[in-house]
Amino acid sequence: MGSWPTIRDLLLLSKQRVTPTGPNLAAFLAPVILSYHIMAVLVQLPRTKLFRVALLPLVLWLALRAGMSLDFSGKQLEYAYLNKALALVMFNLAMRATTWTLVNEPYVKVIGHHKARSSNGIANKADSGSFTTSPNNIRSAMLNASDLCNNLRGLGWNWSKGIYVRSPTFKTESRLVFAVLMLGRSFFYMSICDATDLCVRALAPQGSTGWSIFDPTLPPIRRYLQSTTITLLVGFGGISVLEMYYCLTAVTCVVLFQQHPSQWPPLFDKPWFATSLARFWNRGWHQLFRESFVAVGYKPLEGILGQYAVIGAFLVSGAFHDAGMRGMGHVDTLRIVSYFVMQGAGVGLERLWRQLTGRQVGGCLGCLWVWIWQCLWGHLLVDSWAQGGLIARSAFFPARPVSWALSSAGVLRELNSVA
Ligand SMILES: *[C@@H]1O[C@H](CO)[C@@H](O)[C@H](O)[C@H]1NC(C)=O
Ligand SMILES: *[C@@H]1O[C@H](CO)[C@@H](O)[C@H](O)[C@H]1NC(C)=O
């Protein structure tokens, strides 16, 4: 009797993940990156929708294949998060290709990088002159394609009008000054990551696999106090990890690729002070994936649900984060998606509140509401991450300044062995 074909068989994928050697990277990563770039060229040219529709299934399959076929972890749990990163990159690429397939009007890069920001902090819009599929235009679209592929917020493109981008507090024209400042910032965030990681490791049980943030040996009140502490620490740690890598990428691009500091405006806008969930998700949190979440999740539902269609955007965000955890071999779809759907429900509740009372959610009470809602539902996400071995088990940072300082002062010998 033959066994049932698995998902991998049906999708014609290899049985097992392979190590990222040169030939494997060429076989699995190169095709998907190439097809993504072709999509980026097509979306800049008018009357190419049919080509995009035809190409999309191939891009989706290549993305799935790359995401499921490579193994960057070296079979070690502390590097399994690299497979999560791979899955997220591939999912994002698939979402963007889908977004580009759905749009009717071509994307246009309207400004050179020295003017990537407008004064009001919203990505600039402008109209450019004629554009056709002339050879010149195709060449120009090919040159601009890699910017489009890597420029998630669309800074300097005419499609990103709705995306909020915070103006930098300190503007500089000098690449050197910017690089030094960003290195300082990344060191600061690296220290925060390291400190929160040390704290969470101290609270987590020893071991080399996943764990739960709910310690069954503790009495209920202490158990939930501890899980709340861990959730908050992981929240701060998570933002810091993103900030750290953003700063390091900015330095690399400005120094090595001669990009301009204005192409690297702040990623977050003080999420801790957000006075409503709508503000938290529209401005406070980073907006890197907003374009796709709106195009794939919000737009299709808008006709039926009206403004409550935001739930669709959060659903797609949930699927995105679920794909990440699946990438590192942890399947916990219900809890991961629930966290994001509850964020959408929270935003919906705020709208309902406004309709019923005529008042916006805001002020100190609004801020408290955001913290309570995040903390409550954040437990689902953080516990899932902990059980998947992402938290207190991952070697996230290039360096660990706080651990190093503490251990050279002889304070934390035993923790050092864990780290
Ligand atoms: C971008 O600009 C072009 C040229 O002005 C215009 O035709 C197109 O509709 C714009 N695209 C979007 C997505 O706004
Ligand atoms: C490519 O970018 C430049 C600005 O850097 C712009 O002038 C040109 O119109 C863009 N080409 C296309 C096809 O969008």
Image (tube, rainbow, N blue to C red):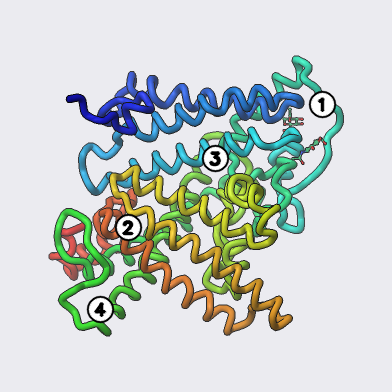
| Precedes in sequence: disc 2 or disc 3 | 3
Identify residue for label 4. 223
| Precedes in sequence: disc 3 or disc 1 | 3
| Precedes in sequence: disc 4 or disc 2 | 4
Respond yes or no on whether mark 4 lies under 8 Å from ligand 1: no
Q: How far apart are marks 2 and 3 (CA)?
A: 23 Å
Which residue type carries mark 3?
Met
Q: Where is residue 109 in the image (x, y as percent from the top left)?
A: 72, 35
Q: In this view, does 358 lie above or below 332?
A: below
Q: How far apart are marks 4 and 3 (CA)?
A: 39 Å
Position of the N terminus, as image quadrant, is: top left
For ligand 2, which image quadrant applies? top right
Q: Nearer the viewer, residue 171 or 239?
A: 239
Respond yes or no on whether mark 1 lies under 8 Å from ligand 2: yes
Q: Position of residue 309 (x, y in %)?
A: 63, 57
Identify residue for label 1. 131
**Direction top: furthest residue:** 135
Residues tagged 2 and 3 counted as in contact (Cβ below 8 A): no
